[in-house]
Every structure is written in C-alpha cells, then in structure tokens.
C-alpha cells in the first residue's frame, strides 16, 4: 500500500475496544457512553481485518484501545495474530496498555510472540496517579510492569506531559526508567475529544521541557526509531532512550507510515483528520475479502498529507470530536 505522497503504509494500529478501566483526564470525560457490543467487531472479525492488512503489506501491528487488556478473550486475538510472526509476514506484534491487567497477561503475550510493549504511566506518585486516571491504582500498574519485565518484555513508558500536573516529575521518570531498563517517551497533549476540562491549561510544549531537562541530563540526539512518530535522544547518564512526540510543535506527518482502525472497523487514514472509511460493511457483507481489500485501497488513496492540530486559546473546542480512546493514539 502506497499513498498519494509516496509513503508506504506498513504500520497498523488497531483499537480493539473503546472501553477502559481508567478515565485519564486528558483522554476521557468522567462520564463516558461506550458503544453497544453489536457495533464492535468480534475477535474473529478483528483477526480477519488485521490479517487482510498483513496480506497487503503491514509489517507492524499495534493493539490498543481503550484499554485492550480489558477486552474479554483478547489473548485469543494475540494467539491468532502470532501466526503471522511465525510465517515472517509480520515483523512485530505489539501493544499499548495502561498496565492494569499486565500481571495477568504478560506471560501469554510473550508466548504469542510479543516482544516489546508500551505502558502508559504519567506519574510515579500514587495520589497524583489516582487523580490523573480518576480510578487507577499505581501499585497495580507497577506490579504489572514488574511481571512484564520478568516475562522478558521490553517496555517503553509513555507519559503525557501536563502543565502543572506532572511537569516536575520528569526527572523521577527518567531515573526510574534508567533503573528499570525502560525507554521513556513524553507526549504532548493532543486536542482530541471533549474531556470535561480545558486543554489549553494542560498544554506543555516539549521543546520547553527538553531545554529544561538538558540543564540536568545529557541528551544526545539519536537516529533510533521504533516505527512511530517519536524523535529520540539517548540519556547518557542512564543509557536509555528518551523520546518526544510533539504533534503540535513539530509536524511528523512527512514520514507517516501508519493508519488506524477502530473497534467498529472504521479506518482513519490520519489521527488528526476526520476522513475515514467504513470497513465493517464490506467485512460483514461477504466471506470473501475482495470488497474489503478494495475499500482499503480506496481509503489509502485518500490518505491526507498531514494533520491540522491546533490548541487555540480562543477556540477551546477540541480540534476533533472523537476521543483518543477511539483511535487508540
Ligand atoms: N489504554 C491504553 C493506554 O493508556 O496506554 C491504550 C490507549 S491510550 C488512548 C494510548 C495513548 O494515548 C496513551 O499513552 C495515552 O496517554 C495517550 N493519549 C490519550 N489521550 C491523549 C491526548 N489527548 N493527547 C495525547 N496523548 C493522549
Ligand atoms: Fe484509558 Fe488509556 Fe485513555 Fe487512560 S489513556 S483513559 S488508560 S484509554
């Protein structure tokens, strides 16, 4: 799959549920209405959809959500998708999780071929973690991370940088990641979905964060890439990578190799644009993949050049109405 700007589409992110056991303040409103089950693709349908993309050249598959590990029976999807790793058609099967259920699933993930995962953890302070996630138990997440490391998974920690919330914790996170052999990526808040709060208050440009960190840490620019949009530096004091995802201060679209599918089978060609294609109808219409493949090709031909995120103080509406938990980040 090659889009109109010559970019090879080799990376698919699949949101397997819109549900979550947390309500992170930057991601969801406190009161969320989740989708009825009939609208959500079954695990068999998700396998068929992912496998079709693998057949079309996708080499990296990231399972996300909502919280993917709260979806009932989700390990059967990993088990099925693992077959594409064995044939070599797929190079990487991975996961983004809040870590709450990792202690239960870490070993199975390894058994089914997962080698690296991303765990979102914005704070190392139990009270702040609770306030940020509205529900989450930091102890449980740390226990999940321990289990995952013990099972042999490589972990990258994701932390959303929030002004006045966790901006004094980045040193601690860098240190903690150094001690646990984890890489760290800091993420700027993106204006996706109504969150019952004001995002302009939370927004913290990572260019500012980096300059501040450089007063205490030696950050060497690195060519390290993980197939995603992060730009990495090496923290010389810890030996781990520190990445920055800066959708608002830096445009990463020119090298974009990915598309996203929601749990209802809607294909988004860009995280920052509304244009989408329905893949559920062709998927359910026939046992043959012909119509599905045609719909995918037609959608890739419409992949836009880039996004138009902007957090504007005069316009406090989100740039896009859908939440990050729909497309999974
Ligand atoms: N529940 C899983 C988790 O938290 O890792 C997977 C889904 S979550 C939507 C994926 C990533 O998106 C998380 O790292 C989260 O911090 C990030 N995220 C959610 N809303 C965001 C926003 N408005 N701006 C930037 N990142 C966001
Ligand atoms: Fe749930 Fe992840 Fe969104 Fe937090 S960021 S509410 S854990 S989907």
Image (cartoon, rainbow, N blue to C red):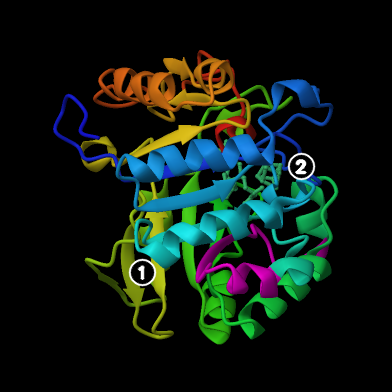
- For the magenta stretch, what is the residue range? 106-126
Looking at the image, can residue 95 be seen?
yes
Determine the quadrant in which ligand 2 lies. top right
Mark 1 lies within 8 Å of ligand 1 (Cβ measured): no
**Which residue is at the far left?**
6
| Identity of the residue drawn at 50% across and 14% down | 314
Looking at the image, can residue 329 be seen?
no
Quadrant assignment, res 65: top right
**Could you tell whether 87 is left or right of 83 in the image?**
left
Neighbour tally class for label 2: few under 14, some 14-19, many 20 plus, Cα within 10 Å: some
Q: Dot 1 lies on which element?
A: loop
Neighbour tally class for label 1: few under 14, some 14-19, many 20 plus, Cα within 10 Å: few
Q: Position of residue 268 (x, y in %)?
A: 44, 25
Q: Is 130 above or below relative to 145?
A: above
Mark earlier in primary sequence (2, 1): 2
Q: Position of residue 169 (x, y in %)?
A: 61, 65
| Identity of the residue drawn at 34% across and 39% down | 249
**Could you tell whether 300 is left or right of 197 in the image?**
left
**Could you tell whether 322 is left or right of 23 in the image?**
left
Q: Is 89 above or below relative to 40?
A: below
Badge 1 is on which residue? 214
Residue 112 painted magenta: yes
The mark closer to the camera, 2 or 1, is 2
Residue 105 painted magenta: no
Q: Position of residue 48 (x, y in %)?
A: 53, 38
**Which residue is at the far front?**
287
- Residue 20 numbered tag: 2
Mark 2 lies within 8 Å of ligand 2 (Cβ measured): yes
- C-alpha separation, residue under disc 2 versus residue under disc 1: 35 Å
């Amino acid at each position: 799959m090659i889009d109109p700007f010559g970019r090879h589409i080799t990376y698919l992110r699949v949101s397997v549920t819109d549900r979550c056991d947390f309500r992170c303040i930057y991601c969801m409103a406190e009161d969320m209405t989740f989708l009825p089950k009939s609208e959500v693709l079954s695990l068999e349908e998700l396998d068929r959809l992912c496998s079709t993309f693998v057949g079309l050249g996708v080499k990296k598959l990231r399972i996300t959500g909502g919280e993917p590990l709260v979806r009932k029976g989700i390990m059967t999807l990993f088990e099925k998708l693992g077959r594409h790793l064995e044939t070599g058609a797929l190079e990487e099967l991975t996961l983004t999780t809040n870590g709450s259920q990792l202690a239960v699933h870490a070993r199975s993930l390894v058994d089914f071929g997962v080698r690296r995962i991303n765990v979102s953890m914005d704070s190392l302070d139990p009270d702040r973690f609770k306030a940020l996630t509205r529900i989450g138990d930091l102890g449980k997440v740390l226990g999940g991370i321990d289990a995952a490391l013990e099972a042999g998974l490589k972990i990258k920690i994701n932390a959303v940088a929030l002004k006045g919330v966790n901006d004094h914790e980045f040193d601690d996170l860098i240190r903690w990641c150094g001690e646990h052999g984890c890489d760290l990526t800091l993420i700027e808040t993106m204006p996706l979905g109504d969150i019952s709060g004001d995002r302009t208050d939370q927004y913290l440009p990572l260019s500012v964060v980096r300059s501040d960190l450089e007063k205490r840490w030696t950050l060497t620019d690195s060519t390290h890439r993980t197939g995603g949009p992060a730009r990495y530096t090496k923290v010389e004091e810890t030996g781990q990578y520190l990445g920055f995802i800066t959708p608002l201060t830096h445009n990463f679209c020119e090298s974009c190799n990915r598309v996203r599918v929601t749990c209802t089978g809607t294909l988004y060609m860009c995280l920052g644009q509304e244009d989408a294609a329905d893949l559920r109808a062709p998927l359910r219409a026939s046992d043959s993949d012909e119509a599905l493949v045609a719909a995918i090709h037609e959608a890739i031909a419409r992949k836009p050049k880039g996004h138009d995120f902007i957090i504007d103080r005069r316009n406090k509406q989100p740039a896009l109405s859908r939440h990050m938990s729909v497309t999974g980040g």
